Amino acid sequence: MISNDQQSIHGQWSSRWTFIMAATGAAVGLGNIWKFPYLTGIHGGSAFVLVYILCVAALGIPMMMAEVMIGRRGRQTPINTMRALAQENNASQSWQLIGWSGTLAGMLILSYYSVIGGWTIGYIIHSATGSFSGLNGEGASALFQEFVGSPLIQVGWHTLFMIITMYIVGRGVQSGLEKAVTYLMPALFVLLLTLVGYAMTTGYFMKGLAFLFTPDFSHFSGTSMLTAMGQAFFSLSLGMGTIMIYGSYVPKGTSIASTSVAIALADSMVALLAGMAIFPIVFANTLEPGAGPSLIFETIPVAFGHMAAGMLFGTLFFVLLLVAAWTSSISLIEPAVTMMIENFNMTRKQAALWTGLATWLLGLGTAFSFNLWTNVKVFGMTFFDLLDFLTSNLMLPIGGIGIAIFAGWLMTKDTSHAELNMNTEAGYSLWQILIRFIAPIAVSIVLIHAIGVF
């Protein structure tokens, strides 16, 4: 039996508020500021937002509660936590594969996330030096293709992004992770609010709000529903071990339920604020809100290149992207670092160095997939597309389903009830229904859809 007083050997958050900031930082990333706006544009705007928020409430929050609960109960790296809890609940040791999958997924995601994070550094320089000035659509596309087409540039920014990430992780929980999010998360919200304030001056702010918040189901489909469900799950960084390892640092008296709600609210707020900042700028410049993944790196630079003070606010926008990328990247690699410490008796700095080096080397494949390896295909996909498919479409949903089943069916009611410590029995019963039935079925449907079965 695991002791209720057990503490993680890696340390713990100094307060509930710090955990909320750290977990929100893990959840808030390029997916909120880059992916959410263009998915909203593709799937008709407000109807997508409404379904997304409902999915966060019914799917994301119960899943987050389960993952934090497992992490705090085990107080170890996801692999060792799942091994210990499986033993505690007389379950098969095969459940530790969830920990292995999440840890590996975090490294794989960071390997390509770092390359895209490096793009934001490059685009900060482009914006600050006036490269967007007077740019048209063709010019923006050419600029992006030239940027990603250079192996040297890609590797350089990828390297810088990884060095800073691993420096933060190597400093530990309170001196590294906690100190970083203490500065980065307030900075992220200040930058977002500044850009929203600027969007109010475009003359199209109300049109942007209507696009986001006036329900219109005429452009909404079954695919839109599944996309909203998947985005709600993935935007909270579930199924990849990051919330589990961050949960292992949570002080015993912290309410898991209220904290999970606060994290989900903050994460959704960032996504909505990003939409409020981006869509007025898009409409003011007669751009296409459903431009897809190119919205940020090809469409938005055109807008900043033609507006007053565009150089300043364009630079702030890409600084915002960089901050969001860093708060996520430090959480992605944390499960692998703690695994090296616990299983191979390394110091944190040694573990950060070796996991960082391995992730950096893997990231070279993504950096080259846009230039030297554009014609190298595996199952018809580039190296970058293959990693994205494996992690987003397979590893994360499978991990999420496993966590839901383990928390809902294998952990005893006494254990989960004590760990969650919810105020009402009705609240706990609702969580059990959602985590036992709704979450596994919903994520299974997302998984089946993502791999192209329907």
Image (spheres, rainbow, N blue to C red):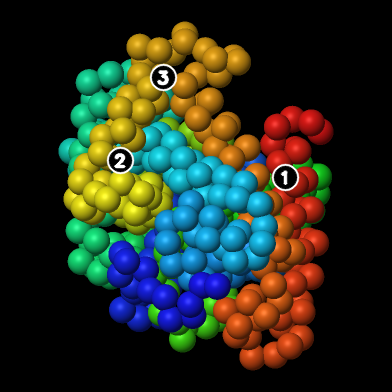
Q: Identify which residue is drawn at 48% across, 33% down.
A: 294
Observer-side mark, 2 or 1, equals 2
| 228 shown above or below 191 | above
Decide: few, some or many residues near mark 3? Use Cα within 10 Å; few <14, some 14-19, many ≥20.
many
Q: Mark 3 highlights which residue? A: 369
Residue 209 is situated, as x and y percent measured from the top left of the image, at: 58, 62
Dot 2 falls on a residue whose secondary structure is helix
**Residue type indicated by callout 3:** Ser
Q: Position of residue 179 (x, y in %)?
A: 24, 67
In the rendered image, is residue 58 in sight?
yes
| Position of 404 relative to 178 (above/below) | above
The residue closer to the viewer here, 333 or 263, is 333
Q: Amino acid at mark 2?
A: Thr
Tell me where residue 152 sits by quadrant. Answer: top left
Residue 446: mark in rendering: 1
Mark 3 lies on a secondary structure that is helix
Q: Is residue 33 visible to us here? A: no
Give the spatial CA distance, label 3 vs label 2: 22 Å
Residue density around tag 1, few if under 14, some if 14–19, many if 20 or more, within 10 Å: many
The percent coordinates of residue 105 (x first, y second) are 49, 41
Q: Which residue is mark 2?
A: 355
The residue lying furthest to the bottom in this view is 423
In which quadrant is the N terminus drawn? bottom right
Residue shown at 33%/35% (left/top)?
A: 359
